[in-house]
Image: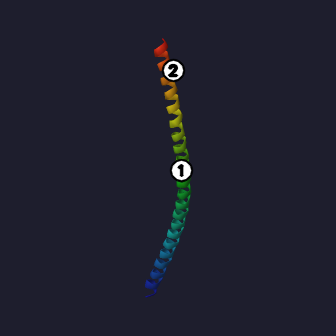
Amino acid sequence: MESTTHELAQIFRQLGSMVSQQGELAIRIDENMDATLVNVEAAQGQLLKHLNNISSNGWMMSKIFIVLIIFLLIFVLFA
């Protein structure tokens, strides 16, 4: 009976240790999730900034294309 009680106490100590380790793991996972959220929000900001740059560059490329067409027409008409 005494050995069974001793084994049971040892099992509960091991269980307590495992629960403690799992708690630490859960805390690390939570911290990693917070860091991931910050990184995703920063990435979203960078993507929006890049989208704005692409949009404004598209308008600039259109202007350059129009100027090149005008020069080509002038060259063809007066050459």
2 and 1 marks in contact (CB < 8 Å): no
| Residue located at (50% from left, 36% from top) | 58
Single out the residue that lies furthest toward the front.
Answer: 77
Q: Residues within 10 Å of mark 1 (few under 14, many from 20)?
A: few
Task: Please give the residue where the numbered disc 1 appears in the rendered image.
Answer: 43
* In the image, residue 20 above or below residue 66: below
Depth check, front residue: 64 or 19 = 64
Which type of secondary structure does the marked residue at label 2 adopt? helix
The residue positioned 56% from the left and 52% from the top of the image is 42
The residue at 49%/71% (across/down) is 18
Left or right: 27, with 7 as reference point: right
Tell me if residue 12 comes above or below residue 43 in the rendering: below
Which mark is in front, 2 or 1? 2
Q: Residue furthest top?
A: 79
Q: Position of residue 27 (x, y in %)?
A: 54, 66
- Horizontal and vertical percent position of residue 26: 51, 67
Seen in the picture, residue 29 relative to 56 is either above or below; the reply is below
- In the picture of the structure, the residue carrying the numbered disc 2 is 71
Name the secondary structure under disc 1. helix
In this rendered view, identify the residue nearer to me: 56 or 4: 56
Q: Position of residue 4 (x, y in %)?
A: 43, 84
Q: Residue at x 45, y 81 (%)?
A: 8
